[in-house]
Image (cartoon, rainbow, N blue to C red):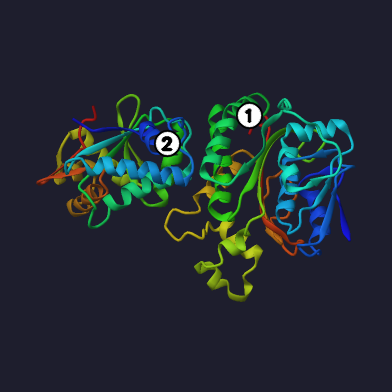
Amino acid sequence: MTAVITVPAYLDEQSFEQVIEQVAPLPADAKLLVDARHTRFSTPYGLTGLLCLAQSRAEKPDFAPPAEDEVKSYWSRSSFFRYAEELFTVRGTIPKGRAHQDADGILEVTPIAKSEDVHAAVERVKDRATHILMNKLHLESRATMGFTVSLSEACQNIVEHAGRGGWVAVQSYNWAKRRVGRQVVVISVADAGQGFRQSLGTTRVRAIAGDRWSDGEALEAAVTNGYSRHTEPGRGQGIRGIKGYVHRHDGRLSIRSGTSRVTIVPPWDDSPAREDSLPAFAGSQLQIIIPERVEGT
Amino acid sequence: MTPNIDVREALQDSVNPAYTDLVTRVTGQRVRMLIEQRIAGLADGSVAVLDFSHIGLLDRSCADEILSKLMLPLTAEHPSKDGYVVLRGISEHHLEIIEAVLEVHDLALVVQLPSAELRLVGAVSAKERHCWETVMRHGEALVDAVADEVGLACEACQEMLERLARRRLLRRKADRFVPLGAVA
């Protein structure tokens, strides 16, 4: 029997939890139909999350694409279908051929598995990011370099720690009607790999934690305290650098792994700093939101 | 003559001829190994200038892999080689990343600014910086002269200058301390 997983109309980090809630109780080899027919919008987090969902399944899931042509066209421009066609059995029509890049698209969905992929992503992002960050977010040119560096460091977490390939996507939005109330740029880096708990599973911090060791403890160790599975000094600087960049630019960083999420919460957001006992999901999903600079900041 | 190592050339020779950005640990490791080979071929006491002029982006992981792993063996109690390193062609973006990386390891380096002025970056105290700048100004200096100018007791100043020399930021020349040398 096929389990139908309903994708919400507005798919972002928060609403993706509804997808995970439906998938988590099912065995890995259960047959799924991921139904996105009524989905009208997705953030990079939603698109990369759906690809991770497919990667995490023992049996290739079916996928019903959005019904609206405009939405399908956007997902196509984001290169989502290019990879979805490999990971899902797509039930329905999707746009064919190479689509033009979206005006606000900085980096379409891009696979990351090795160091060369990070170089390629950086090369493609740097000019477009500079243009959008300076003209739409009104950041200084120096801040645009920090943005691309943060992207590079986030992608390296996949190469260094995930144990399998993942995805990155970057998009600019006007969130005037949503929480932050300004233009934002969003980076999503997601994988369906081993997650932070397993990655840090042989470290001293895991041994000290003993029975308390959990996804939440592993995330705190890595994100808050800078631990890495590599014991040599100087490791863990990537996340430290991302945190510093996010803090300097009034941004938001969240990392979900397993059943937990930690968030660096800016003044404009009211997310909890740590969430535990979430429904289980494979790998790690990182999101960075950098908002438009406002006068006086 | 001061040996100049073009870091972009090292990147293109060791990783990919099209690259200009120093990103990822894997890339950093390959670039460092090539730089280490070139430094190994220099005479003892040489100052190698790492030229970043043609490098675009630099991320922390790559900077850590190149600079920290290059400098830690040189600044150990029993150094791997009597070698010195100066950085040149550093942008503000590079400087921000390099300083953060050096501080994690309690390292410091001499950087040549576009104005040709030499500056100390990384983990250094205000007193250490003052001592270093005094030696730079004098060209070469006895401990007493530096101690007088900085306002330290001779013994404390001697210890500080020895530490700067051990960290490859000054040279010891008999009873004097001297700058790393003119960078061409």
Which residue occupies 36% across, 35% down? B10
Quarter of the figure that contains the N terminus of chain A: bottom right
Q: Where is residue B48 in the image (x, y as percent from the top left)?
A: 26, 37
Which residue occupies 76% across, 53% down? A60
Residue denoted by label 2: B95
Label 1 – label 2 distance at C-alpha: 21 Å
* Disc 1 and disc 2 in contact, CB within 8 angstroms: no
**Same chain letter for marks 1 and 2:** no
Judging depth in this view, the residue of A189 and B60 nearest the camera is A189
For label 1, the SS is: helix
Residue A43 sits in quarter: top right
Residue denoted by label 1: A133
User: Measured along the vertical axis of the image, is residue B116 above or below residue A255?
Assistant: above
Q: Where is residue B129 in the image (x, y as percent from the top left)?
A: 30, 42
Which residue occupies 49% across, 43% down? B24
Q: Horizontal placement of B114 versus A178: left or right?
A: left
What's the amino acid at mark 1?
Answer: Leu
Quarter of the figure that contains the C terminus of chain A: top right
